[in-house]
Amino acid sequence: MGSADRDEILGWCDELLTVDEFDDYGPNGIQVPGRRQVRKIVTGVSAHLELIERAIAADADLLVVHHGLFWEFLPRALSEQMAARLGAVLAHGLTVAAYHLPLDAHPEVGNNALLCEAMGFEPTARFAAARGRTIGVVGTAPEPISAAELNSRIGRLLNREPQVLGAGPDPIRTVGFVSGAGASYAQEAVALGLDALLTGEPAEHVTADAREGGIHFYAAGHHATETLGIRRLGELIADRFEVTTEFIDVPNPV
C-alpha cells in the first residue's frame, strides 16, 4: 500500500457524505490537522483517549471517527480529559476527522442503511428527522420473520444480546432503524405503524410507549449500532486511495 494526501482523502469523504447539507451537533470533516501525507488510517466509533492512543500505537497518520472531539454542548474551555486527548493528537501529528449525522443518514454507507441490509430487510422509506434531515431507515422483510429471529440476527451481527421492550406483532414485517440514541423516535415508529424499532439506547418512557403502541423496541447499544458505517467508510477509503486502513473497536457497553 502507498500514501495519499490528507486533504484529498477527506475532501472525497466530505463529498461522498454531503457534509455541507447537514446542521450537526459538532463539526464534520477535519477537526484537528496533522501530517499532510497519509500512509495509515485508523477508523473507530468515538475519539476518546484509548482510541487515540491505540491509533498512535498503530502508527496512524489519520484517525476517522463517528463521534468526534468537539460538540456544541461541551464547555468552550478545555477539561483535563479533553486536554489529554488533544495533547496526544498534537504530539503525534495525528489528523482527526469525524462524520456524525452524515454517516447515520447516508443511503449506502450509513449506519442505518447498513443495519437494515445486514438484518435482511429492504429499505422502503426514510424517517427520524435530526436537525432537519431524516437519518433513519424503514425496512420491510421480504418474508415476515419472528421476533425471536430478529433478536437472534441482532445478536449475531453486533455480538451482544439486545434489550427488548414493548410488545409488538409476531411475525415482524417492518422495522425502523435508527442507530445510537434513537429512543425518542418510538412514537414516530408507532405512528408509522411499524412492527419494531431497532436503536442503540433505551429511555425510561420507552417501556410504556412501546407496550402501549404495540411495537417491539430493541436497544442494541449506542456504540454497537454505530460500528458499521465507520468501518465501511474505512474500507471504501482503502479501495480508492490504496492506503492501509484498520478499524479499531474499543467496546462500550452503552
Image (cartoon, grey):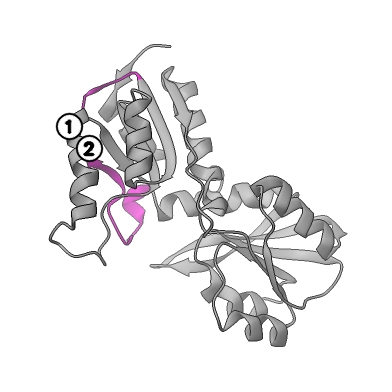
In this rendering, position of residue 128 left or right of residue 48: right
Mark 2 neighbour class, 10 Å CA radius: few under 14, some 14 to 19, many 20 or more: some
Which residue is more in the foreground, 197 or 60? 60
Residue depicted at x 33% and y 22%: 59
Quadrant assignment, res 123 = bottom right
Q: Is residue 57 above or below residue 131?
A: above
The residue pinned by badge 1 equals: 91
User: Is residue 28 part of the magenta span, yes or no?
Assistant: yes
User: Is residue 118 part of the magenta span, yes or no?
Assistant: no
Residue depicted at x 38% and y 67%: 131
In this rendering, position of residue 173 left or right of residue 189: right
Quadrant assignment, res 203 = bottom right
Which residue is more in the foreground, 155 or 239? 155
Callouts 2 and 1 close, C-beta under 8 Å: yes
Q: What amino acid does circle 2 point to?
A: Ala
Instruction: Give, as a single range, the part of the protein colored magenta.
Output: 18-39
Q: Horizontal and vertical percent for residue 220?
A: 62, 59
Q: Horizontal and vertical percent for residue 26?
A: 29, 57
Identify the element where label 1 is drawn: helix
Q: Which mark is residue 181?
A: none
Give the Cα distance between marks 2 and 1: 5 Å
In this rendering, position of residue 39 left or right of residue 187: left
The residue pinned by badge 2 equals: 88
* Viewport quadrant of the N terminus: top left
Mark 1 neighbour class, 10 Å CA radius: few under 14, some 14 to 19, many 20 or more: few
Residue depicted at x 32% and y 62%: 25
Q: Is residue 207 above or below residue 87?
A: below
How many numbered markers are drawn?
2
Q: Can residue 73 be seen?
A: yes
Q: Can residue 14 be seen?
A: no
